[in-house]
Each structure stands twice: as structure tokens, then as C-alpha cells.
Amino acid sequence: MVYTVTLNPALDYEVLVDGFLPGSLNRTKHENMHFGGKGVNVSTVLHSLDVETAALGFVAGFTGKALEDGLKAAGIQTDFVHLAEGLTRVNVKISSGDGGGETEINSQGPAIPAQALEALLQKLDRLETGDVLVLAGSLPMGLSGDTYQNILSRVEGRGVLTVVDAAKDLLRGVLPYRPFLIKPNSAELGDLFGKDSLTEGEIHFFARNLQSQGARNVLVSMAGEGSLLLDENGVCRRLGVPPGSVRHTVGAGDSMVAGFLAGWLESRDYAAAHRMGAAAGSATAFSDSLATGEEIRALLHAFS
């Protein structure tokens, strides 16, 4: 079973307008609402690839109920901690059809009291050898910067494979716990080492640095340049991107994590896992929402 933890999930509301004008009335041409947060995205794509998964984290208010009900309706198992106060986030992404780019508005989300965090940790106590735990995304209000370390400490020594998709100090802090996989993108990798942009050689060098600090496998997504995997055997693999039109970038990195896990759980082979991860990330980028299992498998041939 793959358990995903999203400490700050959201309803993601995406709209397309002809030409976004700040300070004016804008009418939409297209709207889409989906259930988001990085871990939730991972569970959604895993489910589409027929991998057993459960989404954990915190939800609050009527927006939290909508998120939980929507995931259950899609057949995804959930086991959220319900907060007494606040609202689960609604994040807004406005795409301007005239080439004006994208504008994002991300909500803060509810504060997490100490007793709610303990309730989540108790849920994680049931994880067993062979289970996978995915920690993804930012921390909400009320949680300390060492929250991910505390979670990994809680499952340490039980044979649980851990995956972390986070940035900056959140990522650096988990390395001593030897996560099975970390997945920074190239910009996040540069931030970790104080560089604005990285060459492929630098990406490889810094991935090895993270591996030397404890990460077993380092998967770096590089947007239109593809991805690089440095596996625990010291093998570096590089994959590009297949031909296609990018339509939707939200969740592409999360899809890559899900695809990698699905591929590895099926084959126990890092090359196959990398191919499935690359196909999943590309399939989401080429669609209007998170990719389906059928869309992902259709792109696998591009990486054979």
C-alpha cells in the first residue's frame, strides 16, 4: 500500500480567460476544479495506474468535505484528520489565452493544532514492512519546520519506504533518514545550493551531493528538458520528453513521482520506474488535468 500525506491539501480551481485584466471584470472561457495538493495528486495518479493507495492529511470545513467526498467518489481511499476550525484551501490559477501567462493565488489553509498532528502520527503507526509513505508539499500554519523529520522518525526501522517531494530546508532536513526517493525539480535543486540555473553537469553533481547526505535515489524533473535519475547503485539515467503540446503543468511533477513508484513496485527495476515516471509526467503536461492510466501507458513507447 502507498500512503500519501498532504498536510495542506486544496481544491484547485483553474480558469481560462481571453485576456486577463487585473482590476477589471474578467469572464471565463473554461473552468476546471480538481482535488489537489501534491500527495493527493500522487494518490490520484497511482489509483489510475491500479496501485493501491490511501490519501492522508488534514481537511477542514465544507471545502475539506468536498475534497474528501470527491476522492472517495473516484474510488480513492482516504483517512484524513478532520479539523474543528478553518477551511481546506481553495487555490486559483488563471490562464490568459492571449499569451499573457498564468496567475496563481494560493490560500494559506487552516492552522494545525498539536493534537491533530498526533492523530495523524497515530494513523501512520499502522504502516508495515513493504508499505510506501509519500510526504509531499508545504507545511501549513501551526506545524514546525521539523514536522517531516518527526514523521520519518515515527516510521523509522519498520521497513517502510519513504518518498519526499519538498523544497529547501524541508528536503534537506529529511536526508539523514535515508529516504528511498526524493524528487526536486531543477529550480528547487538550484535553490538548495544557491544557484539560479543549473547545467546538466551541475544537476548530476548536486544530485550526487544529496545522495551522499542520505537520499537513496534522486529524481530531478527538468520541465521541457526531461528528467535525470541517479539511482542508489550509482547509475545516472537521463530521459528527454516526447513530442507533444504542453497544456497543463499542474501536477506533472507529482505524476512523475506516482509513475516512478508504480513502475518500481511492478518491476523492482529503476530503469523501468524512470520510464514510467517520465511517461506519467509528460502525459499530465499534455492533458487538461492529471493523466489517466491509459494516457500514461500510451506514452511509454516514447521512452523504450
Image (cartoon, rainbow, N blue to C red):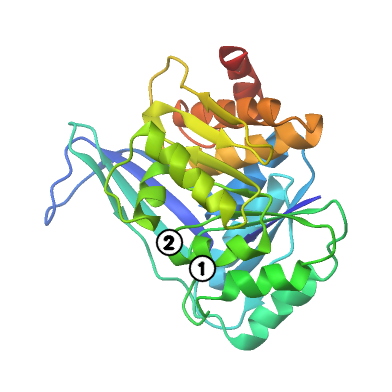
In terms of secondary structure, where does tag 2 sit? helix
Q: How many marks?
A: 2
Task: Give the x, y percent position of residue 120.
Answer: 70, 74
User: Image check: 167 left or right of 276?
Assistant: left
Task: Give the x, y percent position of residue 235.
Answer: 62, 31
User: Image check: 251 left or right of 301?
Assistant: left
- Residue 67 versus residue 108: which sits nearer the camera? 108
| Mark 2 Cα shell of 10 Å, populated few (<14), some (14-19), many (≥20) | some
User: Image check: 249 left or right of 86?
Assistant: left
Task: Give the x, y percent position of residue 124.
Answer: 77, 68
Residue type at tag 2: Lys
| Mark 1 Cα shell of 10 Å, populated few (<14), some (14-19), many (≥20) | many
Q: Which residue is mark 2?
A: 168
Task: Give the x, y percent position of residue 217.
Answer: 63, 44
- CA–CA distance in space, label 2 to label 1: 24 Å
- Residue 5 versus residue 146: which sits nearer the camera? 146
Identify which residue is drawn at 61% across, 87% down. 114
Instruction: Answer whether residue 115 is visible to the viewer in this image.
Output: yes
Identify which residue is drawn at 79% across, 29% down. 267
Residue type at tag 1: Thr
Instruction: Answer whether residue 247 is visible to the viewer in this image.
Output: no
Q: Which residue is mark 1?
A: 88
